Amino acid sequence: MRMKIDYKRIWREINEDSLTNPDQRIARKVPQQGFFSMFFATDFAQHLRFLYILVEPGSNISSSSLPTFRGLDVKVATITLGSHRNARFLVFAQAVPQTDNIFEAVISDICDRIGSLTDSGMFEETLTNILAEWKLFFDKGSEEILSEAAQKGLFGELSFLKDYMFSRYSIAEAVSAWTGPERTNHDYQLPNGVAVEIKTTAGQQHRKFTVTSEKQLDETGLNALFVVLYSVFVHVNRPDLSLPVLISEIKSALHTDTITLLQFELKLARYGYNVESADQYSLGFSRAGLTILQISEGFPRLLRTDIPEAIGDLSYSVAISGCRDFILTEDEFQTRF
């Protein structure tokens, strides 16, 4: 099992050392997880932060081959750092002062995913994919907010996290099980082999829900698969009921576990939510109804075996009226998931 690294603590220790050594660039090695040596550093005078990744001998990686975006500078430099003398490092530099939170999120994501590699030959491809994902996030613009549909979807997924997952699992297990931001087949993949898909619609009653993949309603390899349908009222100009309020409540529940809090913030960013734009959200949401379905043999659905190979980009709707035999009460759901 991979160790959990408290990146926020490392940055905090660097900042404390920088206060007494303001003219020096203070660096700390990130605890080794895999093939690559990585260091955090802070230039206190310029209010900038850095990540250094030791480049393996023989590697031809160059900064010009990697995706770039505003706020992050990338270069290859030969420097001495720790026990590595005159070594080649890939250097990621915070290019805009006073953007510590988002820079920490990007760098922590890089460290987590590079540190988990089991094949050093996958370094450049993995790093390229990470930076490409963050480029999409930053290219949206710092003031752009999620669409109403995306806000409803995220509200549903986070409501399930707060209302069900936190009461059933530790906060670390609960946040880890939320895989919706990674675009997995199901929004929650639980440690006990159970998966949960969340659907959120506006209105008081559910009449139908949309399925966007033949895998969403496929319980193959799972102990159980559930679909939780939230119906919500949408309120104009009600920031007190907005998505940032729900996010703030969840972050308050996570505040004692800085590692899990960072993972939660990373998942929000992957979803497309930018914490810097929180004050731009004015739509409010309140729960109007809840329907819970257990997917099993006989449920109305399309599976891969039902679909000709030439068919792709599958999307269809399922009427709730045809799923009566699969509806669970909340008490039944609590005993089964």
Image (tube, grey):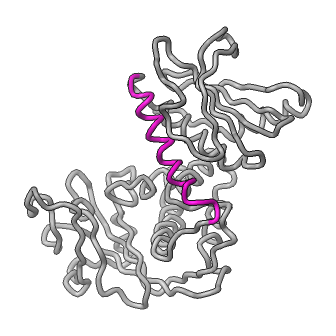
Is 194 magenta? The answer is no
The residue located at (49%, 68%) in the rendering is 154
Is 126 magenta? The answer is yes
Q: Quadrant of the C terminus?
A: bottom left
The residue located at (89%, 30%) in the rendering is 22
Q: Is residue 183 above or below residue 327?
A: above
Looking at the image, residue 270 sits to the left or right of residue 222; the answer is right
Q: Which residues make up the magenta segment?
A: 121-143
The residue located at (19%, 84%) in the rendering is 322
Residue 294 appears in view = yes
Quadrant in which residue 311 is drawn: bottom left
x and y percent of residue 91 in the render? 63, 28
Looking at the image, residue 24 sits to the left or right of residue 55; the answer is right
Extreme right residue here? 20
Q: Is residue 247 above or below residue 256?
A: below
Extreme bottom residue here? 204
Q: Is residue 148 above or below residue 184?
A: below
x and y percent of residue 255 in the render? 69, 54
x and y percent of residue 328 in the render? 31, 77
Quadrant in which residue 25 is drawn: top right
The residue located at (46%, 19%) in the rendering is 60
Residue 31 appears in view = no
Extreme front residue here? 64
Task: Give the prevailing secondary structure in the magenta stretch.
Answer: helix
Q: Is residue 310 above or below residue 149?
A: above
Disc count in the image? 0
Q: Nearer the viewer, residue 138 or 146?
A: 138
x and y percent of residue 122 in the render? 39, 28
